[in-house]
Image: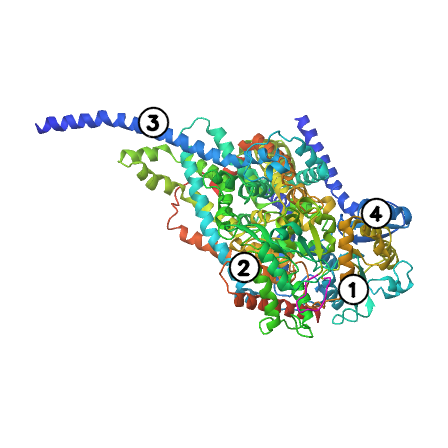
Amino acid sequence: MSEKKLSRRDLLKVLGTATAASVLPVGIAKASPRFQTDTVTFMINSNELSDDEINQFHEANPDITLNRIDYDQTRFYAMLAAGTAPDIVRVQAPTIPQYVARNLLLDLTPYFEASSVLQPDDLMPVNDYYRADGPLAIGQGSRYGMVKDWSPDMTIWVNATSLEEAGITVDPTQRLTYQELADIARATVQKQGDRVLVHGLLFANAGAWIDRVWMAMLLEKETGLYSEDFRTISLRDNSDVLEVIRFYYDLALEGVSDSVIAPLSAGWHGEAFVNGQASCLQYGYWFTPMANTGEAEDHAVMLPAPTWADSPVSPCITATGGVITAGTQNPDAAWRVFEWYFGQEPAQNRARGGWGVPGLRSLLDLMPNETDFQQATRAVLDIELEHNFTIPFNPYLIQPEPTPVAASYMNNLEAALTGAMTFDELIEAVERESQEAIDEGIASAEV
Amino acid sequence: MTTAKTTIELQRRVYRRPYRMEYRIKWGRVLTYLIVILITLLVIIPIIWLVITSLKQRSEYLTYPLRWLPEVPQWTNYQQALEMVPYMRYFGNSLFLAWIFSMLTVVTSSMAGFAFARLSATGKSRLFSIVLALLIVPSFVTVIPQFVIFSRLHLTDTYWPWVLWGLAGSPFHIFLFRQFFLSIPKELEDAAEVDGASIGRIYWQIFLPNAKPAIATSFIINFSWVWGDWFYPVIYLSDKNTLLSVVVARGYADPQGNVLVTLALAASVIYLLPLFFMFLLGQKYIIQGIVTSGLKG
Amino acid sequence: MRKRRRAIAFYLFISPWLLGFVLLSIVPLVVGLWMSMTNYNGLNWDTLSFQGFNNYAKALQDPEVLFAFGRTVGWTLINVPLWLVTSFGLALLMNQSIRARGVLRTLLYLPSVIPPVGIAWIWKIILERNYGLLNGFIDLFIPGSATYWLGPDHALVSLSVIACWTGLGSGMVIFLAGLQNIPAELEEAARIDGANAWGVFRYVTLPMMSPIILFQVILGLIGAFQAFAVPVLMYGGGGMGVTVTRSVRLYMIHTYQEIFVNQRFGHGAALLWLLFIFILVFTAVVFTTSRYWVYEEANPAGGA
């Protein structure tokens, strides 16, 4: 009986310690390894900011503690609601308008002007995505952030062997039209019954940025998905829009590009291309390190972005970068981290790795340029860089990935491709659901 | 003539029936055995396939046509699975959290179960009907508001939600303990009362020690829930302190984003082992517990 | 005096649960109801606007919601009977005196022990189009078929099979216990009265098992309406069900996508309340109609 008594007390002790220990994770999340430092929380993924780089920063800046947390949309919003938003957060350009509309970002213009590392003249034009004069005037005015690394996203990677087998050659200095691209895709697709062995053209059809692709193409015709004030989306009444959407839709319908009726064998587009299962792939320069591997080795060629209306444009539609939130407690310390990440060693590392074009002109030279492949790709890239411009994004759409427009399209696309919905019904559904999202966005942005 | 015929028929019926029934039963038995064994095999094959595939090389999995067995069992897959991500850290996280949650739930549920079984007060039956009703109420209605509340209280990214859930107990386990405690003979309790024991003492030194099966059942069920849950860690936790389930689900991808299937499978097998182990040890209790609540529910 | 002590002790002992119930169930329930009447979208906590029942009205007219609900009803109508029939059938089989029943029962119960993450991995490598076991097996007979088991045509069947496989063991165990508690005299009496196997089943087994069947039906229904984890994980659990094929776009998948991807918390809360109300009503209906087919006096447990 007495032994049992002891075991009861031990149980209590264990319970007590265990519960006390469970407080630890709370403490650890907020603890700083050094005394009296400013803590800057940076919300970005581990493959974009390595522990080595963080240690490097700590050595050079002993008075600042850099705390990295994983990027997650929902968590970011939850932190905003709780008032504990990270100081710096990784964002993509399309989200800037809505954050500006809600006054969530810190105006960094004075910091930029005073900085020796991030000088406004040195900034590539793509950084205009992070400039705003109010949510409806993106591209000019105050600076709220900067690009991390980017690419002209509409460039085309082709597997030259695949094209040769169909008797096609391409000239990397010539800009194709989308129609020509579609013809190539149709000529190089390989099927076995209903199964597609080699897709003709892979692009972000069922992906998170299909609406951005449309906007890029529409810009050539100087039109867009939305009305001028972004309060209405109109798809059905705009024949240009219908043409653009129809273009990609037909390719999916024919099984030339991947969709639910002609799925990939690989896990994602990049893997498919590398496995030789796709002849054309619409990815940006950032794909370079991977493009020349696997089955595509020595056969991968990057082509300039196709043109929809014969005007050479090569936009970037993502422009991943960072901003500093307005509620930051340590703006100066946050700026120090910001400067370091976007202009110093981490930026240099990224430039050298060839996973994207840096945001600063002065870092362009660090990009890989040795092998024939790299030089050929750089040549095309240089052409593209001259034709870059910004796309206006809708400030009323909460732009997670996928955007409401893209999500609606993705959800309904399956029904349309399998015949449960006509193309017109698909467009109507996307327009209706997107308009609903815009209306909700308008209602929540204005009190 | 008629009588003889009837007698003969009767005799035939009497003598033939047992023989025929025996014969039928034998065939029926064989058939039953076959069906059951076939079904069991079909049920087990997916699990066996998991283990087999976890021992293949990546190229042996990604081939067409299907490769049945690996050429050489790749035990290194397991080693790589443990090294590619900080597996043991997440294993420890899950272990720690599951332990705490289970202990807390067992304590609070057994306390409430004891109260419902042996103590009385006004409102007891009404409260108990609430417990019963809650058994059927699905939890999803509170998931989102809880998330929002916990976010505002800065409790996301911590283990506090689980601690609080543990402290709150669970209707199912309260029911389990109550049923169990009802079956403990009143004489034990009466004797202790005569000796002047307080109610707390009675609970602590009489009921709990005699409730080992219920404690085992409750503990295992709770532990398995935390260990296996994927949804709550996904929405509440992040990178450093997330649980093993999340890591096994999506942690095994190479830098390009290609999923390393064979490694993820190896990680899954290790992940499942504690659950199987606990189940095998405690299956008597678990099944008893489920049956008890099922039959009386 | 003693009564009062016991009463105080009662409330003391249930206080953790009671407190937890109020704080973690009642409060969130009310908050959820309130939230469902606002337009909370993650960013506008300070500028919420009260919407009344707008969200509910919108949801009931939203084709996407109705579609997901329809899918879920279909899913339930397929899965619950399937699970009931297979686990009951298995229990009947196992009820014969079979050697090694313990081992078989353990093996059959194993899938129920596996959590959703494990189930997803196990079945991904079986149903995978090019590299999966199932197609590899079929290939031996019909080469080159490569059915897309997780595609729009077959996803519902595939996921239903998976759900059945998972629930088989736990269902069987409960039914088996119920069967074993049927007094043997009843069966013998029926046989003496001239009933054959089918008659025994219809007039003794089923009625005696009807309370358990009712219990399992309700559990099954509630579970099926909430189905979420395995379908989401089968299609890549990263995006909260964004890539799930349409034929299995279940209600909870749609709801959690609205909340965690589109950040429409207010709308999502309304969706959850709608489902909750539906389940309550549905369960109540099942309960009230149960008096027509559940044999009330049957208590296989024989007491308490």
A311 in the magenta segment: yes
Front: mark 2 or 4: 2
Q: Chain of mark 2?
A: A
| Mark 1 and mark 3 residues within 8 Å of each other at the beta carbon | no
Q: Nearer the viewer, residue A194 or B116?
A: A194
User: How far apart in space, not on screen, are marks 4 and 3 (Cα)?
Assistant: 74 Å
Question: Mark 3 = which residue?
Answer: B26
Q: Position of residue B287 (x, y in %)?
A: 52, 35
Disc 2 residue type (three-letter) = Leu
Which residue is at 81% across, 45% downward? A51
Q: Are marks 2 and 4 on the same chain?
A: yes
Bin the neighbour count of mark 3 within 10 Å (Cα to Cα): few under 14, some 14-19, many 20 and up: few
Disc 4 residue type (three-letter) = Ile
Front: mark 2 or 1: 1
Q: Chain of mark 3?
A: B
Front: mark 1 or 3: 1
Q: Position of residue B251 (x, y in %)?
A: 68, 43
Bin the neighbour count of mark 4 within 10 Å (Cα to Cα): few under 14, some 14-19, many 20 and up: some
User: How far apart in space, not on screen, are marks 1 and 3 (Cα)?
Assistant: 86 Å
Determine whether B111 is above or below B188 in the image: below
Part of the protein shown in magenta: A305-316
- The quadrant of the picture occupied by the N terminus of chain C is top right
**The image quarter in which residue B74 lies:** top right
Which residue is at 45% across, 35% downward? B39
Question: Mark 4 = which residue?
Answer: A54
| Image disc number at residue A386 | 1
